[in-house]
Image: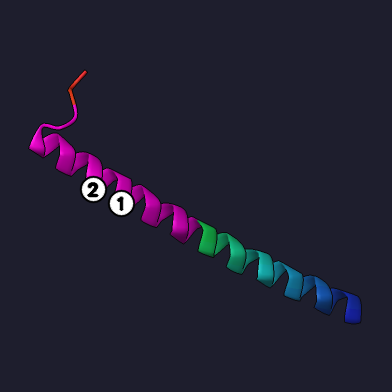
């Protein structure tokens, strides 16, 4: 019984870490997308 409990808490921890990582990646992507759009509008990035 104790073993399965530990397994469950480990799983919950992993899910939390994964969710946090996904959220962080999403924020970074959003930031880079926004800056790319802004620089494209300003014409600072040469269009290929």
Dot 1: few (<14), some (14–19), or many (≥20) neighbours within 10 Å?
Answer: few
The answer to whether residue 41 of the structure is visible from this angle is yes
Which residue lies under the disc numbered 2? 34
Q: Which residues are magenta?
A: 22-45
Res. 31 mark: 1
Residue 40 - label: none
Report how many numbered discs are placed on residues in the image.
Answer: 2
| Image coordinates for residue 16, horizontal then vertical, percent | 59, 69
Q: Is residue 1 visible in this depiction of the protein?
A: no
Q: Secondary structure at mark 2?
A: helix
In the rendered image, the quadrant that contains the C terminus is top left
The quadrant of the rendering that contains the N terminus is: bottom right
Magenta stretch encompasses residue 36: yes
In the image, residue 10 sits, relative to residue 22, either above or below, namely below
**Residue at horizontal 17 percent and vertical 39 percent from the top:** 39
Q: Residues within 10 Å of mark 2 (few under 14, many from 20)?
A: few
Residue drawn at x 52%, y 64% is 20
Drawn side of residue 42 relative to residue 11, left or right: left
Asked if residue 37 is among those painted magenta in the image, a careful observer would answer: yes
Helix, strand or loop at mark 1: helix
Mark pair 1, 2: CA separation: 5 Å
């Amino acid at each position: 019984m104790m073993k399965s409990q530990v397994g469950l808490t480990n799983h919950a921890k992993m899910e939390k870490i994964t969710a946090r990582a996904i959220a962080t990646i999403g924020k970074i992507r959003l930031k880079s997308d926004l800056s790319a759009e802004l620089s494209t509008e300003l014409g600072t990035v040469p269009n290929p």
